[in-house]
Amino acid sequence: MATFLRTLSYRYQWLYDTISRLAALTVGGETRFRNLALQGLTGDKTLKILDLCCGAGQTTQFLTQYSDDVTGLDISPLAIERAKKNVPQANYVVAPAEKMPLPDQQFDLVHTSAALHEMTPTQLSQIFQEVYRVLKPGGIFTFIDLHQPTNPFFVPSLYTFMFLFETETAWQLIKTDLAEKLTTTGFEIHKQEQYAGGSLQMIQSRKPGSEPLK
């Protein structure tokens, strides 16, 4: 069970941002962390991108460098209000990721950054189904999130972080084969990599069909 620090980190944006920047140092800093899930993808500024569980817009800001048509979605009205102030050029929707009030086949790319570990196994399955629904044929679903370290040196730091700031869903996620859940939903795995001694995983998956992104 997470400590009171988790509540404080969500209440105070400066604390959340500080924690995020410190955690990102393990992969070379925040800019590299935010771009890891986008590596190798090419397209143009007309691509329709969904930043799923966008929070206060930390990753949304990076996504607007790739496209002029970015939508951020989050269940928290407070987070969305912060995102609107931080990244006013994007569009925003207040809604749960597992039940998005969005049309079928609307987006070329759906991206989420360090949010899936907040979800229960049932929610994860629902979210993957929803992402599949809102993606165009050939569209990409890409994310970065926690993973069980493959290098024992990184186990203490990850476990301490999770104990202080995360809940049971994070512990469940690092034991979950997300690639298998994606393929069960219908996705094709495009790229799968690990960072920081395996404590972070990045997966790019594709909805079968034409290819708006390469």
Image: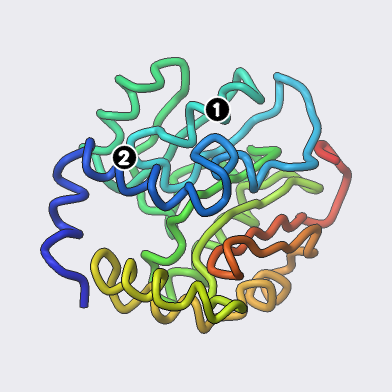
- Residue drawn where x is 36% and y is 64% of the image: 118
* Percent of width and height locating residue 91: 45, 25
- Residue drawn where x is 60% and y is 69% of the image: 197
Query: Which residue is disc 2 drawn over?
Result: 17
* Percent of width and height locating residue 89: 46, 16
* Percent of width and height locating residue 103: 56, 41
- Residue 152 falls in which quadrant of the image? bottom right
Q: Earlier in the sequence, mark 2 or mark 1?
A: 2
**Looking at the image, which is closer to me, 196 or 131?**
196
Secondary structure, mark 2, is: helix
Locate the C terminus and report the quarter of the image it occupies: top right
Q: Is 50 on the left-hand or right-hand side of 41?
A: left
Query: Which residue is disc 1 drawn over?
Result: 70
Dot 1 amino acid type: Val
Examine the rendered structure and indicate whether residue 178 appears above or below residue 142.
below
**Looking at the image, which is closer to me, 199 or 134?**
199
Locate the N terminus and report the quarter of the image it occupies: bottom left
- Residue 45 falls in which quadrant of the image? top right
**Looking at the image, which is closer to me, 163 or 188?**
163
- Residue 192 falls in which quadrant of the image? bottom right
Are there few (<14), some (14-19), or many (20+) residues within 10 Å of tag 2?
A: some
Secondary structure, mark 1, is: strand
- Residue drawn where x is 52% and y is 49% of the image: 112
* Percent of width and height locating residue 169: 36, 75
